[in-house]
Image: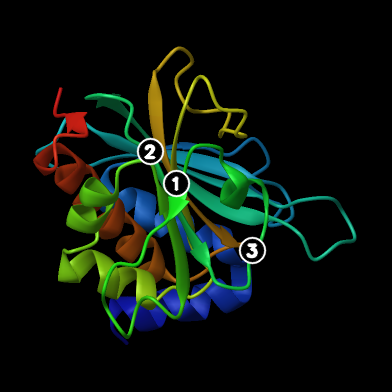
Amino acid sequence: MNIMDKVKLHTRMYGWKYVWKEFAEEFGATVDDPNPDSSQAGMSMIVPITKTPWALIYTMDPGLKGTNGGHTTVDANYAPRGDFKFAIHPQKKIDDISKLLGMQDIIIGDKSFDPLFIVKGNDVSKVRDLFSVDQIRNYIIDEPTVQIWTHSDKLESKLSPKVVAGQPHVLSLRVPGAVDDFERLKRFYELMGALLITLCKVEAAVET
């Protein structure tokens, strides 16, 4: 039995937390799990992105007891260059993220991508440059429920409690439910890393 088969077996036995802890061990993460024996209790982990100044804060919020709520978020603090911001969400998803003021709908120009997602931003050129990266678009297409957005301390967006207070800008990713798939957690790591690197390339962030 290979390692991924073992992870799948133990996930069925012990729940999503087993996958998160296996991921944390492989990626050198720091885990905060106040109630490790309960898969109904949330947890978080701080995962450094190799060879970069950034770290990702993975958080599982189980939502209210007795509901089908809850979501997984991945947040990263970054140093901005200017006031660039963007948001992306599935076409059928409407919430506060999609209502950010000062942002317009933007067509990226990819027929396999544009029908699936609404993209908003305050700089059309930078947004298109950001999503011109095939790897980024492909990762997002593989996650049809994903929402990604940038926000600053001027926006009323809920942050993971593990996000360092006082940081000026945050890049966030959110999907519904508890992610119990090692490869999905890894894709989020790769997607967020690619977004942060590309934000620097389009001169919307500084690698510090």
SS under mark 1: strand
**What percent of the width, then of the height, locates residue 95?**
68, 53
Q: Which of marks 3 and 1 is in front?
A: 1
Dot 2 surroundings within 10 Å: few (below 14), some, or many (20 or more)?
Answer: many
Q: Which mark identifies residue 87?
A: none
- Give the Cα distance between marks 2 and 1: 7 Å
Q: Which mark identifies residue 85?
A: 2
Badge 2 amino acid: Lys
**What percent of the width, then of the height, locates residue 103?**
46, 44
Q: Of callouts 3 and 2, which one flags the residue occurring earlier in the amino acid sequence? A: 2
Q: Nearer the viewer, mark 3 or mark 2?
A: 2
**What percent of the width, then of the height, locates residue 5?**
38, 83
Dot 3 surroundings within 10 Å: few (below 14), some, or many (20 or more)?
Answer: some
Q: Quadrant of the C terminus?
A: top left
Q: Of callouts 2 and 1, which one flags the residue occurring earlier in the amino acid sequence? A: 2
Residue that badge 3 annotates: 177
Q: Answer with the quarter of the image where residue 157 lies.
A: top right
SS under mark 2: loop
- Give the Cα distance between marks 3 and 1: 18 Å
Badge 1 amino acid: Trp
Residue at the (38%, 38%) spot, across then down = 85
Q: Do the residues labelled 2 and 1 touch (CB within 8 Å)?
A: yes
Residue at the (66%, 60%) spot, across then down = 94
Residue that badge 1 annotates: 149
Residue at the (50%, 81%) spot, across then down = 9
